[in-house]
Image (cartoon, grey):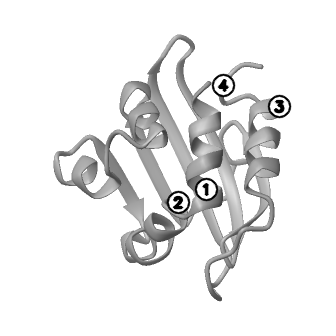
Amino acid sequence: MARYEQDWCDMLAAAVGDAALGEHEPLRLLYVITDTDDGKVAFNIDLIDGAVQACTSGKLPRGEKADVTVTVKEAIIVELWAGSRKRDAAFMRGDVKIEGAYARWLDELVPLFESDPWSTAWAAAVD
């Protein structure tokens, strides 16, 4: 299974299950991963209360926008997912670029992605 393709997205969503983190407005997250063997790739995750509603390989359809867009080199995202690098530190160093609702990234996504179901799913996604 190739990383960032639809089967990989389905595996990520299944691994997280319905893990939620409080009540939050729906959020669309777009990851743009650079410096991969395939060049620049993307996948997006639709969340409601921290639970995955959809994970889709590729860019968003024309005319649709993400609430938060994360742009990062593949080597950095793999370290983040493996737990060997902290998201806040990577952002402060300029290794992770956040566009859109930065407050939602800090308040909702960082704690969510560091929770047990998500950190386990991210670590599995590295393989």
Q: Residue at x 71, y 62 (%)?
A: 46
Residue 52: % across, % down: 75, 62
Which is more foreground, mark 3 or mark 2? 2
In the image, 114 versus 23, the foreground residue is 114
User: Please, what is the three-letter code of the amino acid marked with disc 2?
Assistant: Phe
- Residue 120 lies left or right of residue 40; in this view the side is right
Residue 111: % across, % down: 46, 70
**Residue to which mark 4 is pinned:** 3
- Marks 1 & 4, CB-CB < 8 Å contact: no
How far apart are labels 1 and 4 at the CA level? Answer: 17 Å
Secondary structure under badge 3? helix
User: Please, what is the three-letter code of the amino acid marked with disc 4?
Assistant: Arg
Q: Earlier in the sequence, mark 1 or mark 2?
A: 2
How far apart are labels 3 and 1 at the CA level? Answer: 18 Å
**Residue to which mark 2 is pinned:** 113
How far apart are labels 2 and 4 at the CA level? Answer: 18 Å
Classify the position of the N terminus by image quarter: top right
